Image: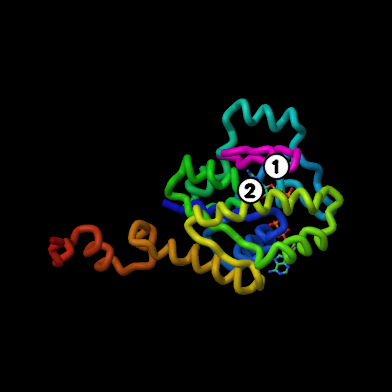
Amino acid sequence: MPKLFILSAPSGTGKTTIAAKVLESLSGIRRVITATTRQPRPGEVNGRDYIFLSEEEFKGMMEKGEFLEYACVYGNYYGTPKSQVEENAKNGVDSLLVIDVQGAFEVKRQMPDAISVFLLPPSLEELERRIANRGFVDDNVKERLRIAKKEIPCAKKFDYVIINDFIDKAVECLKAVVLASRCSSERLEESQRALDSEVVSLIKGGECYVKET
Ligand code: ADP
Ligand code: 5GP
């Protein structure tokens, strides 16, 4: 079965930046586009960055149970559409969720096999600089830093922690997590296309000669 990866971090750490670069250079993985009631920022494209919905449309989807998880973050609703995760799984493609910390815990609760990754800023000063430099009018820097201090201790509950000090290094670390999961013995079935038929039949029908004690 394809895997679900959750990338989470305090706002401004660099989730969107790192996820975009990983998706550019890895095949077989797609980002699940979040639905939100927040207004688009300059340059954001509906359906690419977010699915922008009215509050009425969002609540309609909520009531129909169409979200894997949803949360109110900084006064706006954000939700992960179940349909995209299901579609990716059907097509044999891994899914990448880029979501806040509470959403990450909710997805992990429902799907314990999901692989959770926490991205850490190298320092609070650098995080403040990144939020401020981003320059979005709706970014309340002090509030985001206050929440970040509550979110950072959650890092230890994630499967992997990556420090985003240098973009290229963080991208390589996240790619390594995805690639390593593809070599998991649990995913041997998916590797069969790349294997010679004799090896496939040994894996399927053969018995390991080492007897476990
Ligand atoms: P998030 O999605 O976590 O809210 P973004 O990806 O929007 O964060 O990044 C916030 C800002 O920090 C952006 O301006 C981005 O270019 C910058 N940034 C991301 N990673 C780094 C890094 N390793 N070093 C310096 N700046 C970074
Ligand atoms: P922004 O509006 O700055 O793009 O995102 C604000 C916050 O919402 C970020 O912390 C981001 O991780 C979070 N977020 C984005 N998509 C989702 C989602 O699908 N679910 C949840 N729970 N949070 C999300």
Q: Is mark 1 within 8 Å of ligand 2?
A: yes
The amino acid pointed to by label 1 is: Val
Give the CA separation, mark 1 to mark 2.
8 Å
Q: How is the image coloured?
A: rainbow
What amino acid type is highlighted by mark number 2? Asp
Residue 72 is inside the magenta segment: yes
As drawn, the label of residue 100 is 2
- The range drawn in magenta is 69-82
Q: Is residue 94 visible?
A: no
Q: Residue at x 59, y 36 (%)?
A: 67
Q: Nearer the viewer, residue 158 or 20?
A: 158
Q: x, y (%) of residue 141?
A: 79, 53
Residue 19 part of the magenta segment:
no
Q: Residue at x 74, y 28 (%)?
A: 56
Along the horizontal axis of the image, is 86 left or right of 184?
right
Q: Residue at left 83%, top 54%? A: 136
Q: Quarter for ligand 1?
A: bottom right
Q: Position of residue 167 (x, y in %)?
A: 66, 70
